[in-house]
Image: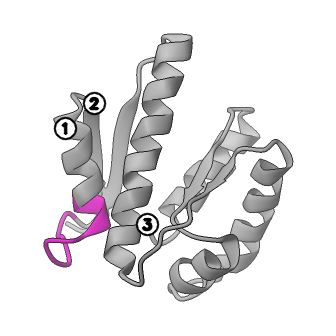
Amino acid sequence: ACGADLLALQTAGELGIDRTIVLPFDHNKFRFVSVIDRPGNWGPLFDKIYEEVKAVNNVVALDAKTEDDDAAYQFANLEIFRQAILLRERSGIEVSTLLIWDGKPKDENDATLHFGDEARTRGIAVDEILTLP
């Protein structure tokens, strides 16, 4: 998400909205391979949000048993939908999906493409914000 997810989590926190973070593997590996390797200085914001969400026990760190990052992120996508559907069933709150991306999958295993496809398969509304014209 190249920071869009962190900005959404930050804004949700400022608005007092409960947040859950689902990571495909442990915090340190995720931070290394999916936060600080991106353009921008996202590490400190990730650390701050992670600690806030961890403090209320809303971090789900999956133990993806794969060296294939694509498979690990797809596994995490499925857990996000599991969590969202449980929330909907418990609270009656409707869930939807927001994709913030350039609209161009990097390949057939693109995690954002997978996320959108999985949402549509589950009948969950998908909105998109395209980052490039």
Of labels 1 and 3, earlier in sequence is 3
State the image coordinates of residue 54 (x, y, percent, origin top left). Answer: 79, 52
Q: Is residue 89 left or right of residue 19?
A: left
State the image coordinates of residue 121 (x, y, percent, origin top left). Answer: 17, 37
Residue where numbered disc 1 is placed: 120
Residue 85 is one of the magenta-drawn residues: no
Decide: is 4 above or below 85.
Answer: below
Foreground disc of the pair 1, 3? 1
The C terminus is located in which quarter? bottom left
Q: Is residue 124 left or right of residue 82?
A: left
Label 1 element class: helix
Query: Which residue is pictured at 43% across the width and 37% down the height?
Result: 82
> Which corner quadrant of the image does residue 29 belong to?
bottom right
* Contact, mark 2 vs mark 1 (Cβ under 8 Å): yes
Q: Is residue 98 left or right of residue 56?
A: left
Q: Amino acid at mark 3?
A: Ala
State the image coordinates of residue 57 (x, y, percent, origin top left). Answer: 78, 44
Residue where numbered disc 3 is placed: 1
State the image coordinates of residue 60 (x, y, percent, origin top left). Answer: 63, 52
Query: Which residue is pictured at 59% across the width and 60% down the height?
Result: 6
Label 2 element class: loop
Q: Amino acid at mark 1?
A: Arg
> For the residues marked 2 and 3, what is the alpha-carbon distance in whole angstroms?
20 Å
Main SS class of the magenta portion in the image: loop
Residue where numbered disc 2 is placed: 124
> For the residues marked 2 and 1, what is the alpha-carbon distance in whole angstroms?
6 Å
Q: Amino acid at mark 2?
A: Ile
Give, as a single range, the part of the protein colored magenta. Answer: 103-113
Query: Which residue is pictured at 18% across the width and 70% down the height?
Result: 105
Of labels 2 and 3, earlier in sequence is 3
Label 3 element class: loop
